[in-house]
Amino acid sequence: MRLAVIGGGGFRVPLVYGALLAESADPRVDEVVLHDVDRRRRDVIAEVLRQMAATATAPPKVVPAAGLDDALRGADFVFSAIRVGGLAGRVADERVALDLGLLGQETTGPGGVAYGLRTVPVVRHLAERVAAVAPDAWVVNFTNPAGLVTEAMSAVLGDRVIGICDSPMAMCRRVARALGVDAGRAWFDYVGLNHLGWLRAVLVDGRDRMPGLLADEARLRSFEEGRLFDAGWLHALGAVPNEYLWYWYAHREAVAAVQTSGGATRGTYLREQQERFYAAVEQDPSGAWAEWQRVRRERDSSYMAEARPGGAVAARDEADVDGGGYERVALGVLAAIARNDRSVHILDVRNRGSLPGLDDEAVVEVPCLVDANGAHPVAAGALEPHQLGLLQAVKAVERETIAAAVEGSRERALRAFALHPLVDSVDRARALLAGYLEAAPELARQLH
């Protein structure tokens, strides 16, 4: 099978290739095509992959693509993992909001709206080229904001685009470990949108273990989300939130944590780290794989630390990042479709009635049965009013963002910022829009 990776110069591509090297069942991916608008980054990652393959038996062939259509032609699967504007764009997304006292984060809050405005036209073009050049391919979307981007692409590709995020399943594995149960035997009742969801129940042998977990403070302190959120609040919610809900439930604290640390955002950290990584590999290509491994460990251990109390002191321990991430989800989806290996994954797909209160076309993040016919969302029970209200508000913002990007409308972009629950006034929304237009000349040209 042929896998096209769009954004093939991205730092996390070796995670996917490493997962492919571990695959033994047929049919297997035997060719990985890398496409990236930044050839320097693509060539560095290609060197990392070559060194990874050196000790493997029959590794997938790595092929640099001459252009987008060349990458897509003949592809069975397309992984979309692009970052429009690069890490400089991410830094701007974070800084403009923080300078106005608002959340600076690339997917949640106004930073996610700005990122979506830049990204939607590019991913819509990608979806159109897939439809024209590789109509039978399945698209697996990693590009953030994952739910918004998947919904924008689904307008062209329908159910042949599936969005993924590693946060929900990683949380489920951590919760299972805290409960002392085999995650493979449990059913996780997880519902929401990308980076905005709740684990409501954990069924083991037909019994819900969630009430016992929420009543056991020692077990709660044993895993990431249980340490991040106050035990009393988790008990009041009756659920375990996705870690990104920290930005909602502790908005003031998250903003204050970044500001008191000197304004060092995640984007700033990653930009500096990756600049050093790509330069180091160019200088000494022989150490590409070893250097990538070192930088990856450093990156994972500091995840979300900048916005938490205590900063780096509150960073994840090894158990919280062990076991694989988005590459595990991506390859699980690929295997389930290619081999009709029916399995359940938490994915971003069109709702189709799975969550009451959201229409069928809304992309939601829920457990799905995946087989040769794609991802089928599993029906969930009714949401609590506070959950549904927040999901509906954020979905409205996502749709205003998509419409603004497709229509090139500054008015709709303003609506997206102003209607966001984490933006506290229309005047702030106007300031946000002005700041992002100034920071991104290409966005100023796009919107009129």
Image (cartoon, rainbow, N blue to C red):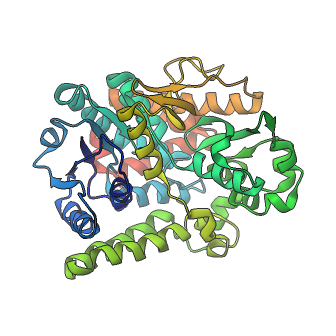
The C terminus sits in image quarter: top left
Q: Is residue 194 left or right of residue 433?
A: right
Say which quarter of the image contains residue 279.
bottom left
Q: Residue furthest right?
A: 215
Q: Is residue 1 visible?
A: yes
- 74 shown above or below 268: above
**Relative depth, front residue between 197 and 253:** 197
- Residue positioned 33% across, 57% down in the render: 21
Counting labels gives 0
Residue 339 in the figure: left or right of residue 187: left
Quadrant of res 296: bottom left
Q: Position of residue 93 (x, y in %)?
A: 45, 54
Q: Residue 434 at x, y = what percent?
A: 43, 47
In the rendered image, residue 362, in percent from the top left (x then y), is placed at 51, 24
Q: Nearest the camera: 358 or 167?
A: 167
- Does 237 appear above or below 181? above
Residue 242 in view: no
Residue sitting at x 88%, y 55%? 216
Q: Position of residue 118 (x, y in %)?
A: 35, 43
At 64% from the left and 72% from the top, the residue drawn is 311
Q: Nearer the viewer, residue 89 or 71?
A: 71
Question: Is residue 198 rendered to the left or right of residue 364?
Answer: right
Residue visible at 63% across and 60% down in the picture: 255
Task: Name the residue furthest left.
Answer: 66
Task: State which quarter of the image contains the N terminus.
Answer: top left
